[in-house]
Image (cartoon, rainbow, N blue to C red):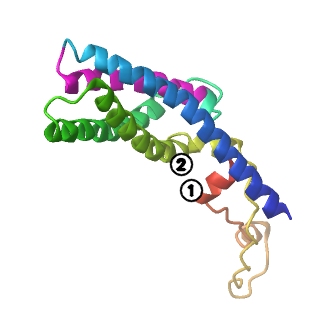
């Protein structure tokens, strides 16, 4: 019964986080697409996309830290760096998509360019959501997640040859419990 309820909580948590990701990241993404189009009228499109991607990544990472993934505060430098890595990959996808469009069509309309850019951004965004949830903001969730059930203690190893137990030797033969390191799947279930 408890696993069914935790499965529902995991699905609800992931859906809630994805909805927040779409609202925060999607809102920043749509605003960015217009900013790239406007800036590209003065400088090369690839440079405009790079500048806007850098600025929007900083903003989106802060929003995701505070609202999407429930970190409850500002993003750390580590989170910004990891988020920048996933944003660099998204930048590559959006640039490639628009450059392919420009190879296929000499002068695409602004609307067609926006459709291609936003479609590539959406595809990259889904992958970015997974990276941010499972890697960048995963440590925060593991700190606030309920503790994993302890694994059964390992059977005691046979004692050394018969020697009388003294306070010094009896401490050596205690049974140790082992904690398992949570996997990415465990972190998702805990969210």
Give the mark, 1 or 2, whose residue is nearer the N terminus: 2
On whether residue 137 falls in the magenta region, the answer is no
Report the residue at 45% width, 42% height from top. 128
Up-down relation of residue 50 to residue 89 (above or below): above
**In the foreground, 119 or 64:** 119
Q: Which residues are magenta?
A: 43-66
Per the model, the C-alpha gap separating discs 1 and 2 is 6 Å
Up-down relation of residue 190 to residue 44 (above or below): below
> Would residue 119 appear left or right of 20 to someone viewing this image?
left
Label 1 sits on residue:
184
Residue at the outermost right position? 1
Q: Secondary structure at mark 1?
A: helix
Report the residue at 27% width, 14% height from top. 39
Q: Secondary structure at mark 2?
A: helix
**In the foreground, 122 or 145:** 122
Up-down relation of residue 184 to residue 106 (above or below): below
**In the foreground, 175 or 160:** 175
Q: Which mark is residue 134?
A: 2
Residue 98 location (% of width, % of height): 24, 36
């Amino acid at each position: 019964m408890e696993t069914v309820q935790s499965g529902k909580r995991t699905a609800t948590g992931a859906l809630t986080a994805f909805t927040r990701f779409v609202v925060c990241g999607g809102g920043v993404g749509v605003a960015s697409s217009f900013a790239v189009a406007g800036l590209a009228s003065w400088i090369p499109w690839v440079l405009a996309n790079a500048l806007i991607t850098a600025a929007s990544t900083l903003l989106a990472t802060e929003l995701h830290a505070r609202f999407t993934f429930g970190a409850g505060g500002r993003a750390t430098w580590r989170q910004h760096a990891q988020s920048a890595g996933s944003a660099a990959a998204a930048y590559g996808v959006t640039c490639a998509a628009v450059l392919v469009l420009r190879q296929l069509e000499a002068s695409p309309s602004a609307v067609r360019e926006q459709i291609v850019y936003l479609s590539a951004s959406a595809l990259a965004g889904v992958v970015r959501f997974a990276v941010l949830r499972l890697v960048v903001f995963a440590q925060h969730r593991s700190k606030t997640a309920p503790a994993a059930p302890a694994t059964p203690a390992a059977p005691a190893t046979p004692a050394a040859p018969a020697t009388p137990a003294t306070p010094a030797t009896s401490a050596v033969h205690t049974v140790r419990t082992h904690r398992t390191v949570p996997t990415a799947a465990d972190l998702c279930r805990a969210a």
